[in-house]
């Protein structure tokens, strides 16, 4: 059996509007490099919403990191910030022009969740690739932090209806 290696990329930034566009371009370029073009639109939408949440809601420190990892046909996109408060999935009234970020993430992803981190929290979502993409000849690896930690996962059932959270190990 031939195993598929993990593909990983991470970037640290200040969650400012001018930086969010740069991160979208980085994520898009990395997914094209990994031949995951079909996941670009959903990944870009999700990472934009998560970074916007950091910009709008994180207390004073807007420092965060974005990590994307493709392993066993699943792309995981996560945003780590220094605010320990968990975001809330809410239903915004039709008349409001904001407040739908996590609902959009939930709608486009297979699963999503939040887990506490030693310095704040990590909000993440997953996207499934239709088929495993070929591994590039030289896969860049830009990593930070220590090994794998458990994720609080939101069930990958239907895109509508209730989702249940559970903790799963990674690594």
Image: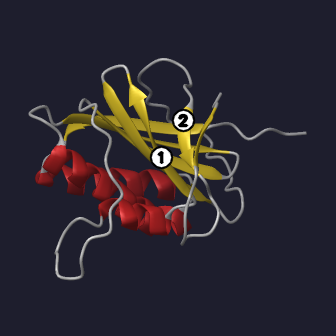
Disc 2 packing (10 Å; few <14; some 14–19; many ≥20): many
**Residue for point 36% across, 57% down:** 89
Q: Disc number at residue 162?
A: none
Residue under label 2, please give it: 151
Q: Earlier in the sequence, mark 1 or mark 2?
A: 1
Could you tell me how many numbered marks the image carries? 2
Residue under label 1, please give it: 113
Q: Quadrant of the N terminus?
A: top right
Do labels 1 and 2 touch, CB within 8 Å?
yes
**Residue for point 22% across, 54% down:** 52
**Residue for point 13% across, 36% down:** 59
Q: Position of residue 22 (x, y in %)?
A: 23, 52
Residue farthest along the left direction in this orientation: 60
| SS state under label 1 | strand
Q: Name the one closer to the observer, 168 or 140.
A: 168
Q: Name the one closer to the observer, 64 or 117.
A: 117
Q: Is residue 100 left or right of residue 19?
A: right
Residue 78: quarter of image: top left
Q: Quadrant of the C terminus?
A: top right
């Amino acid at each position: 059996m031939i195993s598929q290696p993990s593909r990983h990329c991470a970037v640290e930034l200040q969650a400012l509007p001018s930086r969010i566009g740069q991160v979208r371009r980085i994520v898009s370029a990395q997914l094209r490099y990994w031949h995951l073009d079909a996941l670009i639109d959903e990944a870009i939408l999700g990472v934009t919403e998560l970074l916007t949440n950091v910009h709008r809601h994180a207390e004073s420190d807007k420092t965060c990191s974005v990590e994307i990892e493709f392993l066993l046909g699943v792309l995981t996109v996560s945003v780590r910030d220094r605010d320990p408060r968990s975001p809330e999935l809410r239903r915004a009234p039709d008349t409001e022009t904001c407040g739908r970020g996590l609902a959009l993430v939930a709608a486009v992803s297979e699963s999503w969740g939040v887990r506490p981190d030693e310095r704040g929290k990590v909000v993440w979502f997953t996207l499934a690739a239709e088929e495993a993409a070929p591994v590039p000849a030289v896969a860049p690896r830009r990593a930070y932090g220590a090994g794998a930690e458990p994720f609080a996962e939101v069930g990958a059932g239907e895109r509508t209806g209730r989702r249940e959270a559970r903790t799963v190990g990674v690594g």
